[in-house]
Image: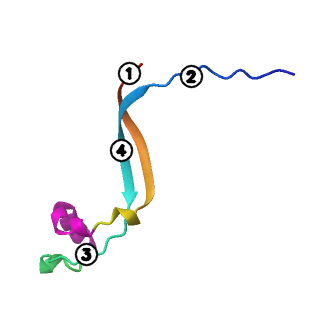
């Protein structure tokens, strides 16, 4: 019978960046130019450019499909 050897471990403090992506269903009442009200693509562009008009309605507690990716490591403190 062979016994598996645990790999050596060490505790470090590490600084790193994480990019977090969430999907959140938002319902907001906004005032938009009349000519884009029925144009989903134009409305999406307007919402992208005017985040301040709807961001208060964003409730991250309702977020789903959350993904996280470590994008950069700055180093460790051994």
Residue 40 image point, x, y percent: 27, 73
| Front in this rendered view, residue 15 or 70 | 15
- Earlier sequence position, callout 1 versus callout 4: 4
**Classed neighbour count for the residue bearing mark 4: other residues with Cα under 10 Å, few (<14), some (14–19), many (≥20):** few
SS of the residue under disc 2: loop
Direction from residue 35 to residue 28 in the image, left or right: right
Contact (CB < 8 A) between labels 1 and 3? no
> Is there CB contact under 8 Å for labels 3 and 2?
no
Residue ID for mark 2 = 9
Q: Residue at x 67, y 23 (%)?
A: 6
Closer to the eye: label 1 or 3: 1
Which image quarter holds the C terminus? Answer: top left
Q: Is residue 21 magenta?
A: no
Image height of 74 relative to 48, above or below: above
- Magenta stretch: dominant secondary structure: helix
Q: CA distance from mark 1 to mark 3?
A: 45 Å
Q: Dot 4 corresponds to which residue?
A: 19
Mark 1 highlights which residue? 77
Q: Nearer the viewer, residue 38 or 65?
A: 65
């Amino acid at each position: 019978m062979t016994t598996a050897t645990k790999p050596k471990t060490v505790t470090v403090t590490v600084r790193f960046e994480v990019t977090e992506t969430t999907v959140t269903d938002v319902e907001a009442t906004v005032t938009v130019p009349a000519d884009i009200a029925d144009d989903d693509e134009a409305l999406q562009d307007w919402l992208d450019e005017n985040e301040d008009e709807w961001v208060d309605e964003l409730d991250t507690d309702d977020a789903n499909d959350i993904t996280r990716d470590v994008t950069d490591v700055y180093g460790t403190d051994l």
